[in-house]
């Protein structure tokens, strides 16, 4: 059970039920909007009554949600209690209540209200949300209690789609004299689901009330009412009529659960038989409770109605001696599921919110980021589109929200994000400035080339940056879009906005912020924040793979095993099948040995551990060899065999991470996880 008393001072245990009630500080620690309530409900001294939490914000069009843990595929009952009289508004207003993305009710501030629903969990949590009606200017949503009760695999949703939600309309203890049966008889644990059973108020005739404290069920069902409810009933020699004229207007769908227990031990099978009518339509006939060797029977009927229900039980005309009897019934409205935001987007944007909250605990915008990100209204700053029958986030505007801190790295995992608008870097980023003169000096005015050949002009700028006499410069964002070609096909490294001097002896080697582009980013740097020139080497290896394959580093629109260029290409290279990864547009236009040299360089550059990667000087030497082979292929072909290269001349020491012990853990994970594709 999850039992929440909103704005409570502390957790308590109900002395009658032994149910533990907790405060809602885990969800909403701010107590400034807590109010005491003066109402008839508060006077009942029911656990949880007496206070309400009021939700207000200067941000328009938002919702407030309680995120509750669930077990996938299990049925749950969820109930919110809303006590009027605790809000400062002097006029009456209303707000909506949602289970997940399904709107199941509206709370009117002039009445004390309970909104209860039944749902099947489709994941590991459910959102119970209050949404302010955009048409209502005055008044804010409020809540007093929230309860979640597991139903296991109940009978409530057996006939419905798993994603449907049922809203309780009535739950009636037909034979009860009490207005509300929750104290003392039908209270949990007698009703193991802690359901609330009310007195019958809708019969239109003087029926006979009957009871038997000795009656018991000899055939149990999952959702059967507690025996204390079944031990009282209404009966009539001819017919029982129950009228409900308070159903929701419009052609709506309902489930009707009927519960019967034969309380007269002298009645034999065949003596009490009756028919069931819904709105004058016979739905079941010849109901005999005792048929089937049981004194208990339940019936589930689905029907459509427009604001009105006439439930009639009529003595059967087949010679039945006794009239109908009924102990309890429930009416639940069926709400079809509403498709919300794609789960991947929900998971990522929730992680983004949590990262932003680390530096912005009191930010008003982030406080309203709860529930489904796109439905029924998008979180402030989010813009969503429909893709494949679900909603996805395409634009994220973080600007003008008084946010501080870094842009969350998890944003790269939003697969459909097209536009990001932010002003975070103004407040958080610290970039070392490099003058144009210093860059030109380090790169000898962008003029040094290896040469030209089948792969076009190959630029040596990274070598000069890494070996610059003044101090090694690390680019930190090497990628194909930052390598520019002039009219002579001479390559130039561009965009030094993330560049940093390499750590020197005595420096910590740590970087406050990881910078780079998903797909090119060194996984060791990403996981350890330790920056070195080998981070550029990794990125350069990705650029080489792009040139070889003609593929992007990350592409989520390909099959899952081809999302990552690196993970897709490695098995082919290790199995000597490079012809299967080479860009089809250049097949037949290169020398096999030269291509193998380039492939081997790329593979060395993308080693997981930076210590195993070559330096740019070695890379240049190997690429020069490949270029010589390519340019002199006609002569070279006479002295070599085609196929797999038998040598790789980059000299490097292979360093394996030392075994970890409880006292000393490795700072470099064996398989650092790269950021996910955007």
Image (spheres, helix red, strand yellow):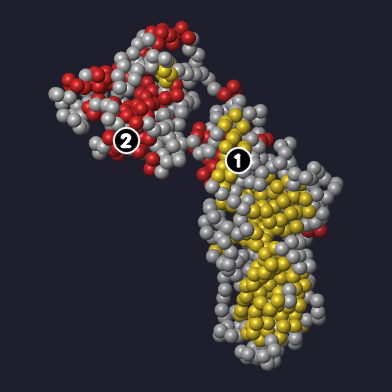
Residue hosting label 2: 581
Disc 1, SS: strand
CA gap, disc 1 to disc 2?
36 Å
Residue hosting label 1: 384
Total labels drawn: 2
Residue at position x 38%, y 17% in the image: 489
The foreground one among 305 and 121 is 305
Label 2 Cα neighbours within 10 Å, binned few <14 / some 14-19 / many ≥20: some
In the displayed structure, does residue 562 sit left or right of residue 144?
left
Q: Foreground mark, 1 or 2?
A: 2
Q: Position of residue 506 (x, y in %)?
A: 40, 17
Residue at position x 61%, y 56% in the image: 337
The foreground one among 266 and 632 is 632
The N terminus: image quadrant: bottom right
- The answer to which quarter of the image holds residue 576 is top left
Residue at position x 46%, y 7% in the image: 437
Residue at position x 14%, y 24% in the image: 638
Q: Position of residue 350 (x, y in %)?
A: 56, 41
The correct choice, above or below, for 58 with respect to 637 in the image is below
- The answer to which quarter of the image holds residue 527 is top left
Label 1 Cα neighbours within 10 Å, binned few <14 / some 14-19 / many ≥20: many
Q: Residue furthest right?
A: 90
Q: Which numbered disc covers residue 468?
A: none
Q: Position of residue 338 (x, y in %)?
A: 62, 53
Query: Can residue 122 be seen here?
Result: yes
Q: Position of residue 135 (x, y in %)?
A: 78, 45
- The answer to which quarter of the image holds residue 600 is top left
Lower sequence index among marks 1 and 2: 1
The correct choice, above or below, for 82 with respect to 374 in the image is below
In the displayed structure, does residue 654 sit left or right of residue 507?
left
Query: Can residue 177 be seen here?
Result: no
């Amino acid at each position: 059970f999850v039992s929440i008393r909103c704005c409570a001072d502390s957790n308590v245990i109900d002395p009658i039920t032994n149910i533990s009630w907790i405060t809602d500080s885990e969800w909403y620690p701010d107590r400034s909007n807590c109010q005491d309530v003066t109402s008839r409900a508060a006077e009942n001294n029911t656990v949880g009554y007496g206070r309400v939490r009021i939700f207000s914000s200067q941000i328009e069009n938002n919702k407030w949600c309680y995120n509750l843990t669930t077990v996938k595929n299990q049925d749950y009952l969820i109930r919110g209690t809303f006590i009027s009289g605790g809000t400062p508004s002097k006029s009456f207003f209303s707000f909506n209540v949602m289970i997940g993305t399904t709107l199941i009710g509206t709370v009117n501030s002039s009445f004390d209200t309970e909104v209860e629903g039944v749902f099947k969990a489709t994941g590991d949590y459910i959102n119970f949300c209050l949404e302010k009606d955009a048409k209502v200017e005055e008044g804010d949503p409020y809540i007093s209690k929230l309860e979640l009760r597991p139903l296991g695999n109940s009978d409530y949703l057996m006939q419905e789609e798993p994603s449907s939600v049922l809203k309780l309309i009535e739950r009636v203890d037909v034979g009860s004299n009490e207005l509300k049966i929750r104290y003392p008889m039908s209270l949990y644990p007698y009703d193991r689901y802690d359901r609330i059973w009310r007195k019958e108020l809708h019969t239109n005739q003087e029926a006979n009330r009957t009871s038997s404290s000795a009656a018991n069920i000899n055939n149990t069902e999952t959702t059967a009412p507690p025996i204390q409810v079944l031990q009282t009933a209404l009966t009539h020699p001819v017919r029982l009529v129950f009228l409900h004229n308070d159903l929701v207007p419009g052609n709506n769908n309902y489930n009707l659960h009927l519960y019967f227990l034969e309380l007269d031990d002298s009645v034999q099978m065949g003596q009490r038989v009756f028919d069931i009518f819904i709105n004058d339509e016979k739905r079941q006939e010849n109901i005999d409770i005792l048929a089937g060797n049981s004194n208990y029977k339940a019936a589930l009927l689905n029907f459509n109605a427009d604001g009105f229900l006439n439930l009639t039980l009529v003595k059967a005309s087949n010679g039945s001696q006794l009239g109908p009897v009924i102990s309890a019934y429930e009416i639940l409205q069926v709400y079809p599921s509403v498709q919300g935001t794609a789960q991947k987007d929900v998971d990522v944007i929730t992680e983004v919110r949590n990262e932003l909250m680390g530096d912005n605990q009191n930010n008003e915008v982030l406080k309203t980021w709860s529930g489904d990100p796109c439905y029924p209204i998008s979180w402030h700053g989010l813009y969503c589109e429909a893709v494949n029958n679900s909603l996805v986030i395409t634009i994220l505007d973080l600007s003008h929200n008084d946010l501080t801190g870094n842009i969350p790295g998890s944003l790269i995992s939003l697969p459909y994000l097209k536009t990001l608008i932010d002003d975070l870097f103004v407040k958080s980023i610290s970039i070392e400035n490099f003058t144009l003169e210093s860059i030109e000096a380090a790169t000898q005015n962008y003029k040094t080339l290896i040469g030209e050949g089948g792969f076009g002009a190959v630029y040596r700028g990274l070598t000069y940056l890494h070996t610059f006499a003044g101090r090694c410069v690390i680019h930190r964002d090497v990628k194909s879009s930052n390598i520019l070609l002039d009219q002579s096909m001479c390559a130039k490294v561009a965009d030094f906005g993330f560049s940093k001097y390499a750590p020197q002896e005595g420096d910590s080697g740590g970087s406050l912020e990881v910078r780079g582009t998903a797909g090119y980013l060194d996984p060791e740097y990403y996981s350890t924040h330790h920056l070195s020139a080998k981070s550029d080497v990794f990125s350069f290896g990705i650029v080489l793979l792009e040139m070889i394959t003609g593929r992007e580093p990350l592409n989520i629109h390909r099959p899952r095993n081809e999302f990552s260029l690196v993970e897709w290409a490695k098995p082919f290279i290790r199995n000597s099948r490079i012809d299967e990864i080479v860009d089809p547009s250049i097949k037949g236009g290169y020398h096999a040995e030269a291509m193998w040299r380039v492939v081997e360089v790329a593979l060395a550059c993308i080693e997981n551990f930076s210590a195993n990667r070559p330096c740019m000087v070695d890379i240049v030497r190997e690429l020069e060899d490949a270029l010589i082979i390519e340019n002199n292929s006609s002569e070279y072909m006479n002295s070599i065999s085609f196929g797999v290269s038998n040598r790789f001349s980059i000299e490097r020491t292979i360093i394996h991470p030392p075994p970890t012990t409880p006292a000393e853990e490795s700072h470099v994970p064996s398989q650092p996880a790269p950021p996910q594709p955007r």
